[in-house]
Amino acid sequence: MSLQNISKKLLFALLVASFTFYSCKDYNDLDVNPNSGDADFSSVVAIGNSLTAGYQSNALFESAQRYSFPAMVAGQMAGVNNFEQPLISDPGIGGRLQLSGSDLSGPTQAQEQGSPINTDLDRPYNNLGVPGAILADFLGQDMGSNTYDNRKQNNPFFNIVLRGNGTQAEQMAALQPTFVMFWLGNNDILGYVTSGGTTPYVPASNFQSLYQASMNAIAQTGADAVLYNIPDVTTIPYVFLLRSQLEQQGTIRYNQPTQTYQLQTPQGYTDIYIETANSTRVMRANDLLLLSASSYFQSVQAGETAPPVSPNSPIPNQYVLDGPISSPPSGNSEIVQASQVVSAYNNTIANAASNNGWALVDINSAFSQIFQNFQQSGGSQGISQNGVTLTPVPGSLFSFDGVHPGNQGHGIVANMTIEAINNTYNANLPTINISTIPQGIPVSN
């Protein structure tokens, strides 16, 4: 996902209050003797997409990959000393969003690229997270006209991670895993969300059959596993952040008497119009502006684009995730549709974990609680561990791209994973001290 035109001021306003550099310490806390309990960690494999790979701030790069949640979890497992990842030199591949040296005005996109480091590994990597992968990619299945070969050809990370040696499932099997971390399915709905509903999602029935086939492939190896569900799409900064920041700046406001959002113009505040898949209408309380719309608002403020104060010049559909206009929420809005799809996906994932006796990390509930804490506290709270408070904004729990966790955010996911493993397999893996994880704010040389 490219975020080339993210507003610097919007991101930096959130970053500056908590901008702290941490020294790079060992994050292991082995005062507790790790015990695997009923699990076997002699061969650990992680399967997933960009979240599993350690992708941050719009790129995959070594200094972030070192703090991917699978690597940190493996680091807490006694005897796991060879958890290999497809490392890429900084600033990575994808166009990293970073601060420019001593210039703290906001993140810019790196023009240079990194390159793969350890391609000569004579076996598959333990972290098989492929940025951009959908659930069907695990087994290499086609999705109608969207074939697996086309997806591989159009995504360089397939070759970087898999090196042309089969699918994620085939490489997983080649490692003869005893324990698998599996987090796929996010991208099956995320593309729909981040495109404002203009990119199709994978239907829940298709997802169910794909997930069951994936679970069968893991079960055939004899490995135990921990599964991860899908977060509520409205709890990531890419979806909720821009509207609140524009309100704080006074660029837009919510008018309670008319129950509409309005844009500040030379003539005063005027109703905002948005384009939806069904119609053009005024913007209401349940409509969310995607972070990608920051460039659109910059263009409006510069006089290059007509302001969205008329049905003839609405905010384009791809910049808005439209919500329900009824109360209680119902209907065919994009937010309702996405919520229903995520719920169906998560039912499938929960059933798979239960049926196989595997651990489940409830990312959905955890991130929803973090977001609720953030909203109720006026933006000061989120989740606190080891004296560190992380809020669901870029530069804190999330990296600059507003979708992927930062280093310490990965630490939170790692600790949730450890808790689920301990509870399911009678293990006593020690949790990670979040305060020892570097915040990992990318800075150019």
Image (cartoon, grey):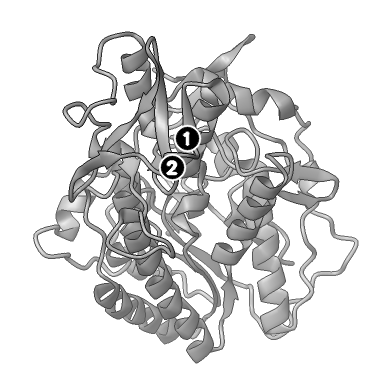
Quadrant for residue 35, please give it: bottom right
Residue 166 falls in image quadrant: bottom left
Report the residue that reaches farthest toward the right.
31
Quarter the N terminus occupies: top left
Give me the disc on residue 255. 1
Q: Nearer the viewer, residue 426 or 99?
A: 99
Reply above or below: 166 against 121: below
Q: CA distance from mark 2 to mark 1?
A: 5 Å
Q: Percent x, y for residue 230?
A: 47, 63
User: Three-letter amino acid code at disc 1?
Assistant: Asn
Asked if residue 334 lies left or right of residue 70, the reply is: left
Residue lying furthest left: 145
- Please report contact status of discs 2 and 1: CB closer than 8 Å, yes or no: yes
Say left or right for 162 vs 386: left
Residues 436 and 230: in front is: 230
Residue 41 visible? The answer is: yes
Q: Residue at x 35, y 76 (%)?
A: 211
Tell me the SS state at disc 1: strand
Residue at 51% in and 66% down: 45
Seen at 37% across and 59% down, the residue is: 326
Position in image of residue 204 (x %, y %): 29, 73
Look at the numbered disc 2 and give the secondary structure of its residue: loop
Q: Callout 1 environment at 10 Å: few (<14), some (14 to 19), or many (20+)?
A: some
Classify the position of the C terminus by image quarter.
Answer: top right
Mark 2: amino acid: Gln
List the residue tagged with mark 2: 259
Residue 287 at what x, y percent from top left? 39, 45
